[in-house]
């Protein structure tokens, strides 16, 4: 084999490795934005997750909370983009005693471009936890009581858009992720409408979605690497919904009681 051919072959192999490596790098970056899934390898053991879930419910019980918004980080925080502290949010709704049900949106696994609504337990919500803390958003007392009736109602279900995008734009009605669904559910409740277009119009006056620093290269290659990375709903700037935007909406409507981070206490060594 000639030197030129060897050089070209080596260059081709290097290029393939570089492209694949860059692809996985991009995939990790994008998956750090929002992760609306309950599938994957748990970092913490089942008993630790049960304990962390109990710490959440004890915190909510201590404050006599009927409905709260909880968020968890599905990526190490150092890997998350600026302005994003958590990757998945859900409603925690008190049932009887100290029990809370968790109302989530997850994407399907057989078809990751479709999503479904699921009710589960705190430990299940924390399954993909990568940081030992959770974000807590507590609406005011009157809003909690009304949300408890609203969540699970036909109006709540009407806010679900099954077509899923990992970093969907909340000002475009074609796709949705977990945080955007919650944003629209809150809007439907606050403004007493199931008209998504009407909710969107009100949201555009109430909040500014979280911008993501996405280069032209990432915008080009991202959708080719992960089908969930649909960018057709974004303009010059990529913007998506985060837990901070949920708190912003409640604050804009004077319905926010408090928002803070709960750091879990480590289990004592046995």
Image: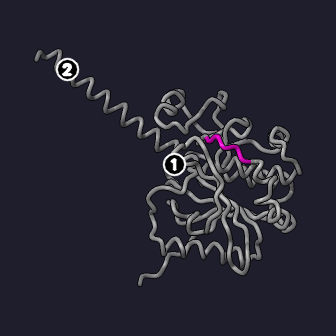
In which quadrant is the N terminus drawn?
top left
Residue corresponding to mark 1:
109
Q: Nearer the viewer, residue 177 or 153?
A: 153
Q: Is residue 215 above or below residue 9?
A: below
Q: CA distance from mark 2 to mark 1?
A: 42 Å
Q: Does residue 27 appear left or right of residue 107 in this picture?
A: left
SS for callout 1 = loop
SS for callout 2 = helix
Q: Position of residue 80 (x, y in %)?
A: 53, 49
Q: Is residue 162 magenta?
A: yes
Instruction: Tell me what residue is drawn at x 56 percent, y 72 percent.
Output: 52
Res 85 visible? no
Q: Is residue 92 above or below residue 58?
A: above
Q: Which residues are magenta?
A: 160-164
Q: Residues within 10 Å of mark 2 (few under 14, many from 20)?
A: few
Q: Nearer the viewer, mark 2 or mark 1?
A: 1
Instruction: Tell me what residue is drawn at x 81 percent, y 62 percent.
Output: 147
Res 215 visible? yes
Instruction: Tell me what residue is drawn at x 77 percent, y 52 percent.
Output: 185
Tell me whether the residue at label 2 lies in contact with that at label 1, contact meaning CB atoms closer than 8 angstroms.
Answer: no
> Which of pointers 2 and 1 lies earlier in the amino acid sequence?
2
Q: Position of residue 64 (x, y in %)?
A: 77, 76
Q: Does residue 19 appear left or right of residue 123 in this picture?
A: left
In which quadrant is the C terminus drawn?
bottom left
Q: Nearer the viewer, residue 13 or 256?
A: 13
Residue corresponding to mark 2:
7
Dominant secondary structure (helix, strand or loop) of the stretch shown in magenta: loop
């Amino acid at each position: 084999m000639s030197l030129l051919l060897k050089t070209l072959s080596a260059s081709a192999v290097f290029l393939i490795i570089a492209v694949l490596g860059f692809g996985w790098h991009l995939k990790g970056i994008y998956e750090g934005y929002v992760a609306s899934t309950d599938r994957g390898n748990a970092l913490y053991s089942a008993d630790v997750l049960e304990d962390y879930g109990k710490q959440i419910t004890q915190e909510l019980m201590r404050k006599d909370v009927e409905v709260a918004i909880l968020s968890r980080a599905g990526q190490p925080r150092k890997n998350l983009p600026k302005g994003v502290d958590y990757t998945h949010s859900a409603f925690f709704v008190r049932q009887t005693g100290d029990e809370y049900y968790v109302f989530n949106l997850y994407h399907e696994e057989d078809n990751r471009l479709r999503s479904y609504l699921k009710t589960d337990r705190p430990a299940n919500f924390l399954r993909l936890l990568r940081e030992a803390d959770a974000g807590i958003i507590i609406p005011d007392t009157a809003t909690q009581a009304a949300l408890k009736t609203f969540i699970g109602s036909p109006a709540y279900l009407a806010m679900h858009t099954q077509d899923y995008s990992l970093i969907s734009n909340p000002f475009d009605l074609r796709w949705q992720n977990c945080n955007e669904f919650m944003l629209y559910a809150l809007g439907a409740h606050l403004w007493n409408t199931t008209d998504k277009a009407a909710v969107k119009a009100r949201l555009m006056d109430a909040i500014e979605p979280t911008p993501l620093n996405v280069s032209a290269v990432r915008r080009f290659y991202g959708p080719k690497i992960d089908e969930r990375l649909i960018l057709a709903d974004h303009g010059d700037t990529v913007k998506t919904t985060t837990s901070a935007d949920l708190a912003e909406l409640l604050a804009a409507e004077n319905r926010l009681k408090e928002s803070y981070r709960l750091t879990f206490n480590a289990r004592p060594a046995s």
